Image: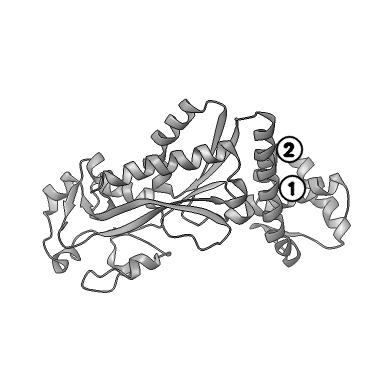
Amino acid sequence: MTGRADWDLLQSLHAVLEAGTFSAAARLRRLTQPTLGRHIDQLERQLGAPLFLRSPRGLRPTDLALSFRPHLADMAAAAQAASRDASGVANGAGGVVRVAASDVIGIEVLPGILTTFRQDNPGVDVELALSNKIEDLTRRDADIAVRMARPTQNSLVAKKVGELTLAFYASPDYVARKGLPTTFEELVEHNLIGFDRNLPELVSDLSIGRPVTRDLFALRTDNDVAQLAALKAGFGIGACQRQIGRKFGLVPVMPDLFSFKLDIWICMHETLRGSPRMRLMFDHLASELGAYAATGD
């Protein structure tokens, strides 16, 4: 397959693999559904084999389609990175910076930090990618990442800017109804908020007098923001940053018996160190997140 049209077809395949349906993929690509369907039909004719099996349950990608997935993800990331780089060249000191962070950091911590960055750098647009998975900076899924662990790739510029302390908290309403535990034995009798299917390695290594397993939690969700929402609503006891606990007026639970720390690292690919807007964002995040971490002491 050669030519520009084939790249259009591959983009449509990538969209269907990501979105799961033709209609959702068409919205992603800003195409009509019939146009996107024709792209898939044409690609199947060129390949001589089906890419999806249609059934009452919806689309199911074939092994052929799935074999394209990692390559298309790399191509899409490269295309998006090229677009961001081109925007910087065209706009001088302006352009786009894509920042990756965890859900809680992106929702509870970064909005104010990015606001001051934009005020100081009105020509730079910000894309914010929120996920608890570690974005691959080597293939430019993001330009800069805020990570809670030391990066392992040698090709990254990385700076540790501080530490976050997490501890148990409960809402005043929950404390009024259930009281406060003073020992781990009492703690496990309370309504605990925690993880469902994806128990982080850090959590499984914590010691609360018994192994930390999913059956310990009265509310289980792998979404950290949902955990925090349940904590604020008074469902039970959960872990959160000290800064967030103070922000929402939460009550510390057994603060002298339990807490743990997470490092804050700012990372970007070494090839971006010469970009003015990337350097500006990197330094701004390092300064502001470092200051934020210091407020948790």
Amino acid at circle 1: Ser
Whether the residues at callouts 2 and 1 have beta carbons within 8 Å, the answer is yes
Horizontal and vertical percent for residue 288?
38, 39
**Residue lying at 14% horizontally and 50% vertically, measured from the top left:** 175
Q: Is residue 15 visible?
A: no
Front position in the image: 134 or 296: 296
Front position in the image: 130 or 147: 147
Horizontal and vertical percent for residue 281?
50, 39
Front position in the image: 210 or 271: 271
Q: CA distance from mark 2 to mark 1?
A: 9 Å
Position of residue 96 relative to residue 141, above or below, is above
Which picture quadrant has residue 51? Answer: bottom right
Helix, strand or loop at mark 2: loop
Amino acid at circle 2: Leu
* Colour basis: one colour
Instruction: Please give the residue where the numbered disc 2 appears in the rendered image.
Output: 31
Q: Residues within 10 Å of mark 2 (few under 14, many from 20)?
A: some
Horizontal and vertical percent for residue 125?
56, 32
**Residue lying at 78% horizontally and 46% vertically, measured from the top left:** 37
> With 27 as the anchor, is 236 left or right in this view?
left
**Residue lying at 15% horizontally and 69% vertically, measured from the top left:** 185
In this rendering, the count of numbered labels is 2
Instruction: Please give the residue where the numbered disc 1 appears in the rendered image.
Output: 12
Q: Is residue 82 visible?
A: yes
Front position in the image: 172 or 178: 172
**Residue lying at 88% horizontally and 48% vertically, measured from the top left:** 3
Residue reaching furthest to the bottom: 210
